[in-house]
Image (cartoon, rainbow, N blue to C red):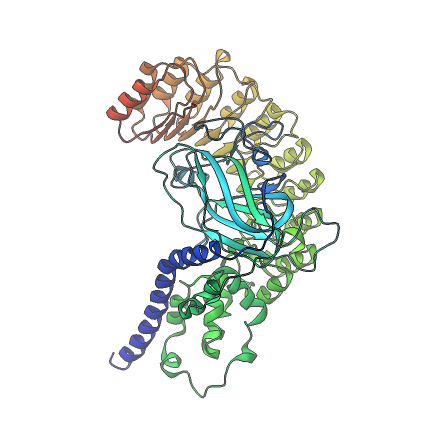
Amino acid sequence: MSSWFPMLTVLSMFYYICLRRRARLASRGEMINSRRAIKSNIRALPMSTKAVQYAKEVLDFSSHYGSENSMSYTMWNLAGTPNVYPSSGDFTQTAVFRTYGKWWDQCPSAPPQFKRTSPSFLSQDYVELAFEEPVYPTAIHILETYHPGSVVKILACSANPYSQSTPAEVRWETIWSAEPTCGSSPQARQFKPCIKEINFPTNLLRLETNSSLLDYYTELDAVELHGVKEKPMLSLKTTTMDMNDLDEDEYDDKDSCGIDCLTNQFSSSSLKEWTNNGYFDKLPYELIQLIISHLALPDLCRLAQTCKLLYQHCCDPLQYIHLSLQPYWATLNDTSLEYLLPRCTLVQWLNLSWTGNRGFISTSGFSRLLRVCGSELVRLELACGHFLNEACLEVIAEMCPNLQELNLSSCDKLPSHAFSHISKLSGLKRLLLYRTKIEQTALLSILNFCPEIQHLNLGSCVLIEDYDLVASVLGAKCKKLRSLDLWRCRNISERGIGELVSGCHLLEELDLGWCPTLQSSTGCFVNLARKLPGLRKLFLTANRSVCDTDIEELAAYCQQLQHLDILGTRMVSPAALRKLLESCKGLSLLDVSFCSQIDSRVVQELSSRFPHVCIKKSFTQ
């Protein structure tokens, strides 16, 4: 015991120092960022005209509340001058992301989080905006009209989206970041973050958001880019170096630095030769592995540069069983993947969401990665992966025989015929196809050959012609289905719902929001309530026909209900809601926005009587 004690003490001290340093950097990060932003704002600008631009075009985004075939609540509303500001409230002319709050991650369909995600990566959604003229940014104003506070990061890109020539290098630089906030008021505001100066002109900005602390959907109206066309000259005051900043510079873009280490510094050839590794040589291999398993990927890269022993530990494939590369989307490329290949032989969970766009990852680079790790892969996240093509899906089907979870959300550039390859993944349990161009033939093939599916997201899949047929096949083939998202499905009827609920008795989560062809008068919602006693989440958003009878049936048969959205109905009374709240003891979210019979007084009374329920009631003024 005494011989081990000094060794454990040394390692514990080393680990404590690492954690303390990271905590100190996290707490000082906002202060350093603010100090630099203040300095950048007092720079001496050249004698040139300041330009103020609104976004010309929305180039890319991760999700939106609206439909693919309209402008209401879509990200495309961020292009151009303000539509709503300075008014506050819920307006269809604004840009709204798909989710808000923490309750979304509490649903049955929510996948487990990746354990080694960088603590500095807080983003959940993003939108990329192009402006007419490249400028050196001096200010950015974001017009938020409802529940502000979701923006957590702003990045500028060196590439001009309107240039005819291909840039030699595409560089993203963070010019402002912060932690998520819980807005004290839902009122509109003009958000003016203190941005960091950059040394290149830009006309491409990216806003990243996190709405987990907000009480309702955040709404964005417009983005102003202020800047000058000539590179600003710094005053003497701003050129003065702060020695404390020198240490922090390494961590300004902490995630990017970590990935650069993969391609530039993650090499044993640069390590000094040591005759021994001190007490580390006497520690059990498993103990060192356990300690470094708590480090994010950039820290793992840095630790690998300290000595050969720790280099070996940091390169052990066991450290990469769960590998999330999403936080490093801005710098991850084929070269990075190449350096990771020897360490990816045991990867089971792989997250490449948001990565590879603008040529960063090629089909061949992605294929080489899957040929190394595909046989062990169980979960593959590829949301917004615009580098994907049919060849990539063919490689997934060929190299990942054990794949159970596949996320292709917002991969809207994938051709329709490419999805047919997914039917070869017969063990799939979770399939997310939100905002993709999948067609009915490919989808029916997948449902016939993948009977193990438990979670299926078909939200905003506008090319599916007959959702009744899809629902019928689901009821016949996918008996284990637990969650189904049909958000903004335009053509499902009571017949399809009837066949779905008759075959899928295990359904716990059903999203029928903005499905206008469903009518309460057909009895479809009553039938649904009686056939699905285990239902925990039900979205009937914007269905004007939902009535007291439907609510009373839910109260009688679906007493495990936790989340209910009946936004927009005119036929539900306070009495029916009281009966529901009395029966469904676990109900935690109830959205009654724009329900004409449910006014603020009723909401206040129900909230007082049932304080455990979060009752949502949006407004327009």
Q: Residue at x 64, y 35 (%)?
A: 443
Residue with the most extreme right position: 164
Query: What is the total number of numbered labels drawn onto the structure image?
Result: 0
Q: Is residue 482 above or below residue 581?
A: below
Is 461 situated left or right of 273 in this image?
A: right
Residue 439 versus residue 6 in the image, above or below: above
Asked whether 475 or 567 is in front, the reply is: 567
Position of 610 with respect to 481 (left or right) is left
Picture coordinates of residue 219 (x, y %)?
48, 34
Within the image, what quadrant is residue 557 found in?
A: top left
Image-based side of 296 in relation to 428, left or right: left
Q: Is 414 displayed left or right of 321 in the figure? A: right
The image shows residue 93, relative to residue 172, as above or below, that is above
**In the rendered view of the protein, which quadrant contains the C terminus?**
top left
Decide which of 157, 292 is in the foreground and name it. Answer: 157
Residue 382 in view of the camera: no
Q: Is residue 200 visible?
A: yes
Q: Residue at x 50, y 24 (%)?
A: 502
| Residue lying at the far bottom of the rendered structure | 275
- In the rendered image, residue 438, in percent from the top left (x then y), is placed at 65, 36
Task: Locate residue 100, reporting x and y percent.
Answer: 43, 37
In the rendered image, which quarter contains the N terminus?
bottom left
Image x and y of residue 53, in percent: 59, 41
Judging depth in this view, the residue of 508 and 154 nearest the camera is: 154
Q: Residue pushed farthest front?
A: 47
Give 374 or 43, whichever is nearer the viewer. 43
